[in-house]
């Protein structure tokens, strides 16, 4: 972990897109949301993604830049549209998603400079949705192989969006990660994918830690907070009450805060407390990231 006092260098891999709410479009995509929050919290963040050569793509690059994110690895694809997702939010602020297919972020390609950029990073962040198409999957896998060879932490933030995942993708992603973050809603499918049959939550997470060869698992539980498990500790952090506008991006904000704390050498318990606070703050405003610039 970065203990030199300099800004931790993070590469976020995957989708940049627009969430289409009933009242308008909001910039989004879990890796992009994570990148924005991590940059706001003091990270030196680079985004590896792809957008279309269109107005939404140009606006997305502009937004990432305004958050201080390095966009030099965001590719512009002439014959693909910038990704979009239909979002319906229920009365509790919980979203459901309709994800458009054949988007620019399905075509993230490799580049000559990518290996060296990855080798210099302090941490790699990736999710499952960004791997749905073969080209992006291959690029993300290459990044993870280089990071693993250089013993760079790899944070998998599970985001299961039907029908764009299967058991093989879940297993392969976990095997490529060193740290797993997931929600309690996703735990059952993850356990099934890894053939783990445990009813008690902590026992299930410990089995997942062992089977996946992971160093750490963090499971968020909405308003009930989060649970962290390593080989030597279990931490149970209560949630923070708030008035919810929507929960879009709350998990991404949580992960960004936790990662920044971890790379700064903070105790795991302190990282959890702060991550819950940051996630709660995200629930108080519409959209996944706070306004800037």
Image (cartoon, helix red, strand yellow):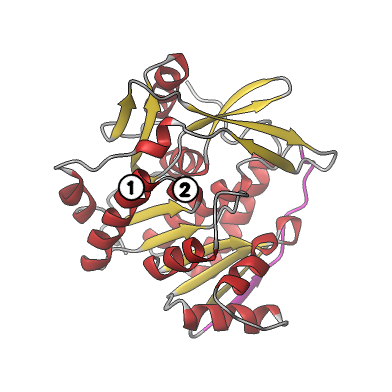
Q: Is residue 74 left or right of residue 103?
A: left
Contact (Cβ within 8 Å) of mark 2 with mark 1: no
For disc 1, the neighbor class at 10 Å (few under 14, some 14 to 19, many from 20) is many
Q: Is residue 110 left or right of residue 68?
A: left
Q: Is residue 282 left or right of residue 36?
A: right
Q: Indicate the secondary structure of the residue bearing disc 2.
A: loop
Residue at image x 54%, y 82%?
A: 233
The answer to whether residue 23 is visible is: yes
The image shows residue 131 at horizontal and vertical percentages of 43, 50
The image shows residue 290 at horizontal and vertical percentages of 57, 31
Q: Main secondary structure of the magenta part?
A: loop
The image shows residue 288 at horizontal and vertical percentages of 60, 36
The image shows residue 134 at horizontal and vertical percentages of 37, 47
Separation of marks 2 and 1 at Cα, in angstroms: 19 Å
The answer to whether residue 122 is visible is: no
Q: In the orientation shown, which residue stands out farthest toward the right? A: 91
Residue 240 in magenta? yes
Count of numbered circles on the image: 2
| Image: magenta residue range | 233-244
Residue 151 is labelled as none
Identify the residue position indicated by label 2 in the image. 132
Residue 235 in magenta? yes
Say which quarter of the image contains residue 78: top left
Residue at image x 52%, y 70%?
A: 217
Identify the residue position indicated by label 1 in the image. 11
Which of the two labelled residues, at mark 2 and mark 1, occupies the earlier sequence position?
A: 1
Q: Indicate the secondary structure of the residue bearing disc 1.
A: strand
Residue at image x 42%, y 43%?
A: 14
For disc 2, the neighbor class at 10 Å (few under 14, some 14 to 19, many from 20) is some
116 up-or-down from 83: above or below: below
Q: In the orientation shown, which residue stands out farthest toward the top? A: 55
């Amino acid at each position: 972990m970065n203990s030199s006092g300099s800004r931790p260098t993070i590469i976020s891999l995957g989708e940049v897109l627009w969430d289409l709410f009933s009242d308008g479009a909001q910039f989004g995509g879990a890796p992009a949301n994570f990148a924005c929050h991590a940059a706001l919290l003091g990270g030196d963040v680079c985004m590896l993604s792809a957008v279309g050569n269109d107005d939404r793509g140009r606006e997305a690059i502009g937004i990432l830049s305004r958050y201080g994110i390095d966009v030099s690895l965001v590719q512009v694809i002439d014959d693909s549209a910038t990704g979009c997702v239909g979002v319906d939010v229920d009365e509790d602020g919980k979203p459901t998603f309709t994800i458009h297919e054949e988007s620019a972020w399905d075509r993230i390609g490799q580049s000559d400079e990518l290996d060296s950029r990855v080798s210099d990073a302090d941490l790699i962040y990736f999710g499952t949705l960004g791997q749905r198409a073969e080209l992006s999957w291959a690029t993300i896998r290459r990044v993870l192989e280089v990071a693993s060879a250089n013993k760079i932490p790899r944070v998998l933030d599970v985001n299961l969006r039907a029908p764009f995942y299967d058991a093989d993708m879940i297993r392969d992603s976990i095997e490529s990660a060193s740290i797993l973050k997931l929600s309690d809603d996703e735990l059952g499918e993850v356990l099934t994918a890894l053939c783990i049959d445990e009813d008690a939550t902590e026992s299930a997470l410990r089995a997942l830690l062992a089977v996946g060869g992971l160093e750490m698992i963090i499971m968020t539980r909405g308003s009930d907070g989060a649970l962290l498990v390593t080989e030597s500790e279990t931490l149970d952090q209560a949630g923070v009450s708030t008035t919810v506008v929507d929960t879009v991006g709350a998990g991404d904000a949580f992960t960004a805060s936790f990662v920044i704390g971890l790379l700064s050498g903070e105790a795991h318990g302190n990282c959890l407390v702060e991550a819950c606070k940051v996630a709660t703050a995200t629930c108080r405003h519409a959209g996944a990231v706070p306004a800037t610039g």
